[in-house]
Amino acid sequence: MAALGDQSEQQAMASQPKPLTQSPPISNIVIVIAMQTEALPIVNRFQLTEDPHSPFPQGVPWVRYHGTYKHLNISLIWPGKDPTLGVDSVGTISSALVTYAAIQILQPDLIINAGTAGGFKAKGASIGDVFIVSDCAFHDRRIPIPVFDLYGVGLRKAFETPNLVKELNLKVGKLSTGDSLDMTQQDETSIIANDATVKDMEGAAIAYVADLLKVPAIFLKAVTDIIDGDKPTSEEFLQNLAAVTAALDLAIEQVIDFINGKCLSEL
């Protein structure tokens, strides 16, 4: 029979708060990529295979590639080709829909949105640079009514990864998203207000869905064209797409290797 003093000590120990246990390592990653040209090098690098039995609703063009790499289950989601016109389903609507569906079905620990983007040389961007995004916002949702204006901008922070940034020596910048490849004067004013270094057509929409469903999301953007340069955006984008996609592919591999075996708090 234990002595009274021992019982008191046991009771005191039982009343102490238990130390917080470290969260388990990341095991399930969803990569969302808007264009097939951007997606296929990553599919090949990680030897992912197309899911013959799509988990998505019948009739949608969304494609899932999946496989395992080291200790990670990786799903790469591409919104597919527009059923009518046969081009990549780019833009905020497709990206938001496919991200929502992927989260619901696949329950990822982490989302990575990877893709190409325009960059601003005034903010230090050069062709081929790969940026990890600190903040996402929209530049073409203009609602000039108090509070609705802030909703339109939709500013959201990406999941913070200070150790990843330091280890891989990544450039960090803010991202501005809109549904047009070109940039109007109004867009430019909003992008400057967003303090953006890079501009794309899906990031802020993915950030909105990830925030809504409380899934951490990080964003990697590789610069194909200099928006404040002297070449037409569409021409420069197509000229540099293949080479910049290769740089993005390499950066994704480095990021995945860093994530492997780590929990979210270690990123």
Image (tube, rainbow, N blue to C red):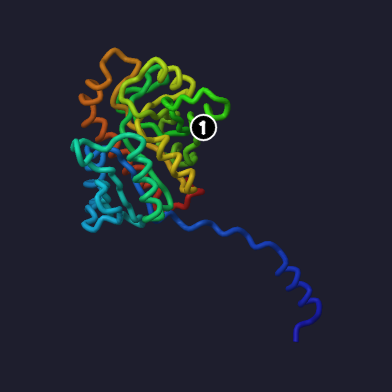
Left or right of 258, for residue 66: left
Residue 90 location (% of width, % of height): 29, 35
Residue name at image x 27 percent, y 50 percent: 64
Front-lying residue, 150 or 161: 150
List the single residue furthest toward the bottom: 1
List the residue tagged with mark 1: 151
Measured along the vertical axis of the image, is residue 125 above or below residue 26?
above
Front-lying residue, 46 or 176: 176
Residue 40 location (% of width, % of height): 22, 43
Front-lying residue, 145 or 199: 145
Residue name at image x 30 percent, y 53 percent: 56
Q: Which quadrant would the N terminus be assigned to in this image?
A: bottom right
Label 1: element kind: helix
Q: Quadrant of residue 230?
A: top left
List the single residue furthest toward the top: 230
Residue 262 location (% of width, % of height): 44, 52
Q: Quadrant of residue 210?
A: top left
Residue 199 location (% of width, % of height): 37, 27
Measured along the vertical axis of the image, is residue 185 above or below residue 237?
above
Q: Residues within 10 Å of mark 1 (few under 14, many from 20)?
A: some
Front-lying residue, 64 or 167: 64
Residue name at image x 46 percent, y 48 percent: 215
The amino acid at mark 1 is Tyr
Q: How many marks?
A: 1
Residue name at image x 30 percent, y 28 percent: 128
